[in-house]
Amino acid sequence: MMAESRHYRALSVETLPDRLGGVAEIASKIGGDASSWKVREVGDGNLNLVFIVAGASRKVIVKQALPFVRLVGESWPLPLYRAFHEHNALVRQAVRAPGSVPEVLHYDEPQAMIVMEFLERHVVLRRKLINGERVAGLASFVGKFCARTAFRGSELSMKSADKKADVGLFSGNVELPAITEALVFTDPYHDAEMNNHTAGLDPVVARLRGDAKLKTKAQRMLQRFASNTETMMHGDLHSGSIMSTATRSRAIDPEFAQYGPMGFDIGMLVANFLMAYFSQPAHRGEDASSYQEWILDVVEESCAVFESEFRRLWATERSGMLYPRALFEDQGHDSMPACEAVLAGIWRDAWSTCGIEMHRRCLTLAHNADFEEIEDVALRARLEARNLMMGAALVHADGDVAGGAGVCEIARSFNERDFL
Ligand code: SR1
Ligand code: MG
């Protein structure tokens, strides 16, 4: 532990070698003299400092929470203890979905700092999607990561007492889920202070905000998000929270982790794939369609893998208090119909979350680069309108969607329409 670590101080490129060089556990891993380390600040997210530190032995990532929202500034304070929940989430994800997250090398609670494995040659997935790059095995990664963390973080797998203790620990993560409660679930549907949207979208925005049934359904999902503790969610699983090479992927950044609905993570991630899909005509022009179809293949296959992995875990790892073998297999009763009913509930939450996420990324504070980088404002508005209207269709569907394939069919039809 650093002598100075009693008092939090934000790191900088200049101070990092001196401050971390004295921490034997970190310095020995990085290797060489700290004064020769090469340090770059690469944080492109909305909240934290992220450094790549290269020494004689290896590169590491040093992630440090800032006491405010980086995107907005010091006027929006944010507690440092979120690093504690991120650390705890990474540790659990590494056990529940082995190989899917960066290895934690060191954690310093007072400095709100996590030192972790540098993911060699990995690039943020959102950038790859904007660039039109394909990632082999992406759907398998997504489906398995979401199914394993959902199943193994629930009472389908965990002992009831362990699960309650964990829910208690993560219920201390207050302010970050509160951002989601406002920015994701509520602000898209009214004229909230920090909202902004692309010029020209007003008619579509008015349609959404004038739709009381839509708002009721979005609030139903917020109620589920806030008061249902089915599993430990990543909590912010968008395409900026996955890093990939051409053949490998990892999930990063689980600082929004809390216990919540099992369908939340996969729903949010599919929304980000769909936004990548709708934005492609601006990035690829006439050649967009084959890459768009690849994105839809990823969506359909991710959902199929999620289901098959969830069913496999149900059959082989159901050792928690829910749906015990004593009630089913031990009495000669097939438990798979119960599994299908649980999956149907997961998808209902997933598709609602998906539609709401498609709204918030175009209407509230934190937009996504897939649309934001489109300079032609009229084109951006036209593509965002398709995305917004499909989001409304998903929320209205109340889970009555023909699975991942059905969602892809809906996307194809909205991709042909104009709403402005
Ligand atoms: C003020 S934080 C805005 C967004 O950035 C994070 O990555 C989450 O997605 C959050 O909603
Ligand atoms: Mg993040």
Image (cartoon, rainbow, N blue to C red):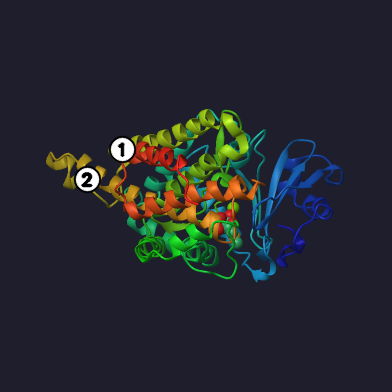
Badge 2 marks a residue whose secondary structure is helix
Q: Quadrant of ligand 1?
A: bottom right
Residue 141 in sight from this viewpoint: yes
Badge 1 marks a residue whose secondary structure is helix
**Residue at the spot of label 2:** 338
* Type of amino acid under label 1: Arg
Residue 314 on image: x %, y %: 30, 40
Residue 25 on image: x %, y %: 71, 48
Residue 337 on image: x %, y %: 20, 42
Is 255 drawn above or below residue 127 in the view shown? below
Is 296 drawn above or below residue 86 in the view shown? above
Residue 404 on image: x %, y %: 37, 39
Q: Which mark is residue 311?
A: 1
Q: Nearer the viewer, residue 175 or 160?
A: 175
The mark that comes first in sequence, 1 or 2, is 1
Q: Quadrant of residue 3?
A: bottom right
* Residue located 48% across and 31% down the image: 293
Is 94 drawn above or below residue 207 in the view shown? above
* Type of amino acid under label 2: Ala
Q: Quadrant of residue 208?
A: bottom left
Horizontal side, residue 339 vs residue 26: left or right: left
Query: How many numbered discs, if any?
Result: 2
Q: CA distance from mark 1 to mark 2?
A: 11 Å
Q: Which mark is residue 158?
A: none
Is 256 drawn above or below residue 409 in the view shown? below
Whether tag 1 and tag 2 are in contact, CB under 8 A, the answer is no
Horizontal side, residue 26 vs residue 236: left or right: right
- The N terminus is located in which quarter? bottom right
* Residue located 24% across and 47% down the image: 341
* Residue located 41% across and 33% down the image: 301
User: Is the shortest distance between ligand 1 and the CB of mark 1 under 8 Å?
Assistant: no
Residue 159 in sight from this viewpoint: no
